[in-house]
Amino acid sequence: MNDGGTYFPVWGTCLGMQEMTTWPLSPSRDVLTNCSNTEKVSLPLNFTSEATKSKLFGKLPDYISKILQREPVTANYHSYCLATKEYAKNSQMRSFYSVISTNLDGVGLEFVSSFEARQYPFYGVQWHPEKNNYLHPKGTKINQSHDAVLISQYFGNFLVEEARINNHSFTSTKEEGRFLINSYRSTFDDTFYEYYCLNDSDIPKFE
């Protein structure tokens, strides 16, 4: 779609980013590594030299940049990751994605925590910007400070602004309503996770 002239941004969080690592590879394959002690931990980001040239981080307000680099505001909930050494030796990956932040796992393995495509509006983060705002599970330490919430809001707004560039629209408010998540009921479980259970019959149709 992007090659055809339609601006179509893609954001991948955690497993979504991990899936995106397969896109540049021919043949497609799994290049992920086991990460240690990266479940339920919040970290600051280590910006790379590419960060200031990126679309995702290049125009960060100074106060947001300082929060990201100095405070543990990125919630990590993963057991696999793209190791920077794997990225460095993979020419297809290097030509497609620019690594803009890294982190260390619990035993010192450096992994890619944020990347973006060089020629497409594709953004991947191994951390969860949404958890600071919207997840309140019992017994889990998620940074929900004022600064952490600002980070969540900033990247939510970034993605919305990217989506605004796309000029597609629904043909009617009725059609739009079928696609809005507000039209479906969410469920809470006893760990304070909110989720949606959708059946095949719930999949909306375009007019």
Image (cartoon, grey):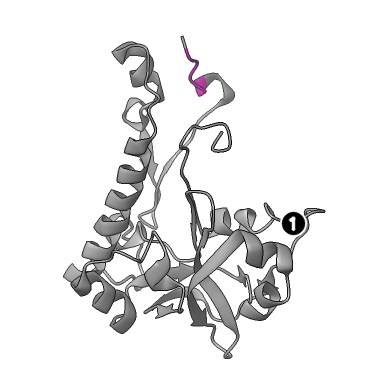
Establish if 13 lies above or below 83.
above
Residue identified by numbered label 1: 25
Q: Which residues are magenta?
A: 202-206
- Does 135 sit left or right of 100 as displayed? left
Nearer to me, 82 or 178: 82
* Quarter holding residue 168: top left
Counting from the top left corner in percent of width and height, residue 91 is at 72, 68
Residue 72 on the magenta span: no
Which residue does the image show at 29% across and 64% down from the upper left? Answer: 59
User: Of all residues shown, which one is farthest toward the right?
Assistant: 27
**Residue 205 in magenta?**
yes
| In this view, 121 is above or below 54 | above
- Provide residue 132's location: percent of width, then percent of height: 30, 63
Residue displayed at 31% across by 52% down: 158
Tell me where residue 193 appears, x and y as whole percent. 39, 53
Secondary structure of the residue carrying tag 1 is loop
Q: Is residue 197 visible?
A: yes
Mark 1 belongs to which amino acid?
Answer: Leu
Picture quarter containing residue 98? bottom right
Residue placed furthest toward the bottom: 108
Vertically, is 97 above or below 113?
Answer: above
